[in-house]
Amino acid sequence: MERRFLSVGRPIFAKNRFIGGIFVLASIDDIYQSIELVRNLTILADIGAILLALGFTFIVSRKLANPLLEMERATRKMAKGDLNTKVSVETKDETGSLAKAINDLAVELYRYRSNQREFFSNISHELRTPLTYLEGYARALKNKQYQTEDEKEMYIQIIEQEANRMSKLVNDLFELAKMEEGKLPLHLEEIDLIEVIENAIAKTKMKAKEKGLQLYFHNIYQLPSIYADGLRMEQIVINLIENAIRYTEKGFIKIELSNDQDKVKILIEDTGIGIPKKDLLFLFERFYRVEKSRSREFGGTGLGLAIVKQLVELQNGTIHVSSEVGKGTNFELTFPIYKGDAQ
Ligand SMILES: Nc1ncnc2c1ncn2[C@@H]1O[C@H](COP(=O)(O)OP(=O)(O)OP(=O)(O)O)[C@@H](O)[C@H]1O
Ligand SMILES: [Mg+2]
């Protein structure tokens, strides 16, 4: 083997006279061996670091990819309609919260789908009933299955009533759909509630009179105005007065206006059949009626209060009901007072 040396030589002078020299020769094999060792160790460390990095990346990517793959599988199942699927990732990091969001979405979709189903079965039921009447009485007329002119007149009246009922149902559904999509145009302006209520009373007092019910209106002097859509406010009040008339056999219906510092309050009170406590919670749901068979006899479809609630909320108001069976019902509405453009 070739050996390596380090050599150093120096001349020695004394009084500017060369008197000799010194020459040192040392083997540097050891140094080279050490360098070799360090180099080998560095290469080994590099390889180790690369392997470690690869392993780490692999583990991390598996750890990330597994839950993501599970979420993908779950969302695909949900998309196919299996909304009972759950993602079982329960970590406390971003992946965990994404999994929770997916699970929440599935619950929401499930609720939406059942609502939708119930809604369609309600619609078809509500449409089928008047259609059966229409078909039956139209056939009876066609086949002249009546004995007297009065009987014939009655059949025609039923047909007219049922046709009106259907067209009201279709209109109500259309309105509700527009409200829920936020597409109902509102003409908001400063309005005087006293005028709105007087108009609503003018339109409903005939019905009250027919049933022998008193219709009172207590207003107050100088009621602050509110910012709302006058016609929609009238629709709200008419709906509530019509309900009061429909579900009251004797007594009165009282409409009262009042205000505090920032709200105007409308109270509509009746002395009617009342609403059981257990029903109050669902009263504003679409198609909800306290007694299905009886309200049909009264002519209702159960959409009135759902529409009222939407309209009240679209105009920043609140609606609250309290009732006692056999005594009567109170609907209380509040709307913020209009404070001018500075509002
Ligand atoms: N003032 C009231 N007194 C007693 N029950 C009421 C009163 N208002 C509403 N209800 C009950 O609440 C139910 C829902 O009312 P809502 O106005 O939504 O429907 P409806 O009057 O039956 O039909 P619609 O208003 O669509 O013609 C009614 O069917 C009735 O049972
Ligand atoms: Mg009603």
Image (cartoon, grey):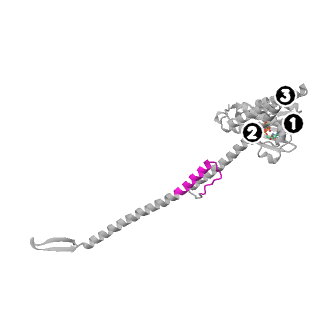
SS assignment at label 2: helix
Ligand 1 quarter of the rendering: top right
Q: CA distance from mark 2 to mark 1?
A: 36 Å
Q: CA distance from mark 3 to mark 2?
A: 28 Å
- Determine the image quadrant of residue 280: top right
Q: Are marks 3 and 1 in contact (CB under 8 Å)?
A: no
Q: State which tag comes first along the sequence, 2 or 1.
A: 2
Residue pictured at 75% horizontal, 33% vertical:
235
How many marks the image carries: the answer is: 3
Q: Amino acid at mark 1?
A: Phe
Q: Is residue 59 left or right of residue 293?
A: left
**Residue 114: x, y in percent?**
70, 46
Q: State which tag comes first along the sequence, 3 or 2.
A: 2
Q: Which residue is mark 3?
A: 143
Please check the rendered image and state whether residue 70 is part of the magenta-colored stretch, yes or no.
Answer: yes
**Residue 251: x, y in percent?**
89, 37
Q: For residue 124, which numbered disc appears in the image? A: 2
What's the magenta bit mostly, secondary-structure-wise? helix
Q: Which range of residues does the magenta coloring cover?
A: 64-88
Q: Which residue is mark 1?
A: 252
Q: Are marks 3 and 2 in contact (CB under 8 Å)?
A: no
Q: CA distance from mark 3 to mark 1?
A: 45 Å
Q: State which tag comes first along the sequence, 3 or 1.
A: 3
Question: Is any atom of residue 336 visible in this view?
Answer: no
For the residue pair 87 and 199, the one nearer the viewer reads as 87
Residue pictured at 85% horizontal, 33% vertical:
215
Q: Is residue 46 left or right of residue 299?
A: left
- Determine the image quadrant of residue 155: top right
SS assignment at label 3: loop
Residue pictured at 37% horizontal, 66% vertical:
44
| Ligand 1 closer than 8 Å to label 1 CB | no
